[in-house]
Structures are given as C-alpha cells and as structure tokens.
Amino acid sequence: MSQRVARPYAQALFSVVKPEGAEALEVTNEALARAAAAFASVPELVRAFEVPTLSGKQKSELLKAVSRNLALPPQVERLLVAMQIHYRLRYLPFVAEEFALLCDRFFGVVRGKVLVPAAIRPQQLAALERALDRVVGTRVILQQQEKPELMAGFVVRLGSLVFDGSLQRQLQLFVEKNLPGGGRYAG
C-alpha cells in the first residue's frame, strides 16, 4: 500500500525536477531525504497534520516553518503541501525512497549490500565498489553490514545478483570439487 501511494508523488516530483538537470535532482533527493528523516524522527509532527483540532491555516504555517527550518527547495515544499492536503505525510519516507530509486536509475547507479565478518575500511569498500563497477558495467554503491558468522570473505548483493566470496562458500566449492560424491556421506 505504502509504495502504491508513494510512487505517484515521487514520479511527479521527478518529472518536475528532471528538466532542471542532474544537480537539481541531487539537491532535491538530499532535501527530500532530510525532510523524510525529520518527519520520521518526530512522529508527533505527522500526527499534527492529521488531527482535526488544527485549522488548515495552522497546518500551513507549521509546514512552512518546517520547510524553512530544513531549508527545503520550493519543489519539495510544494510536494509536502500536496501530501498534507491529502493526509499523506506519513508516506513521506516511502516517497523519498522511491525518488532516490528514480535518481539512481537516472544516474546509472546500482545500490547493494556487502556482508562482511567485521567492518572494512572505507578504502577497501571503495576498491570493492570500483571492481564491481567494471563487472556489472555501472556505478555501484555498497552499504556494509557486519555478519561475524561469515568468519572471512564477503558476500555482495546487488538486487538478484549475488557474489559470494565467503569462506563458507569457498570451502563448500572445495569439498564439492575434491571429495568423492561432493563430500556427501555415502553410508
């Protein structure tokens, strides 16, 4: 439900900002993420726009104050107004997510996750991203997640594409290749 509600708002904002160029898309994406984080971190703020005890004028003034405090560009402020009128501000994080996906597609970026046994240095993460850039033919941005049970190596997930360089997988491949019956117990 939330994605279905969010997608048209994100697409409308994208279609308004796209003609202004790549820099405008980046600025809007960052501002929208900032607004979504603000609304997500203060649930009372969303509720203020949903209760009937505040007048339309009070809600409008509150939204202008929020936009001013967050230094939001006019397009994002207008989006918030449209969402507020239709009682959709609770979906703002989903709109920001959808907009970020549209921007990623526009910029040719694929986001993924790398599972590692312990945190890796930023230089290592950047080197892995560059290597994956060459393999998949597009810019890759990875978010690392620690998974101590891996013990060594890493697993990268880019959508449905998985690169498994974990110790567990390497051992499994070794057993399958070198032991009769693939290492399965025959008795």
Image (cartoon, helix red, strand yellow):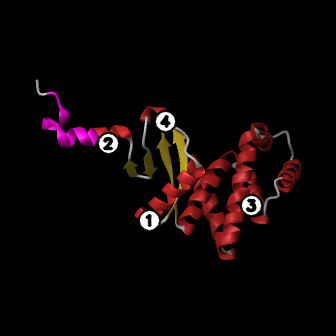
Name the N-terminal-most of marks 1 and 3.
3
Classify 69 as above or below 178: below
Q: Is residue 175 magenta?
A: yes
Q: Position of residue 38 (x, y in %)?
A: 75, 46
First of labels 4, 3 by sequence position: 3
Say which label, 2 or 3, has the lower sequence index: 3
Q: Earlier in the sequence, mark 4 or mark 2?
A: 4
Q: Could you say which quadrant of the image residue 76 lies in?
A: bottom right
- Circles 1 and 2, Cβ within 8 Å, touching? The answer is no
Of 8 and 119, which appears nearest the observer?
119
Give the mark, 1 or 2, whose residue is nearer the N terminus. 1
Q: Could you say whether the residue bearing mark 4 is in a helix, strand or loop?
A: loop
Kind of residue at disc 3: Val
Between circles 2 and 3, the one closer to the viewer is: 2
Along the horizontal axis of the image, is 179 left or right of 47? Answer: left
**Tag 1 secondary structure:** helix
| Cα distance between the residues tagged 4 and 3 | 37 Å
Quarter of the image where the C terminus is located: top left
Q: Which residue is mark 3?
A: 76
Above or below residue 175? Residue 136 is: below
The image's mark for residue 170 is 2
Q: Looking at the image, tell me whether mark 4 or mark 1 is earlier in sequence order.
A: 1
As measured in the structure, the alpha-carbon distance from the residue carrying label 1 to the one carrying label 2 is: 23 Å
Labels 4 & 1 near each other (Cβ < 8 A): no
Q: Which residues are magenta?
A: 172-185
The kind of residue tagged 2 is Gln
Percent from the top left, x then y, of residue 58? 88, 48
Q: Which residue position is annotated with label 1?
A: 134
The residue closer to the viewer here, 175 or 40, is 175
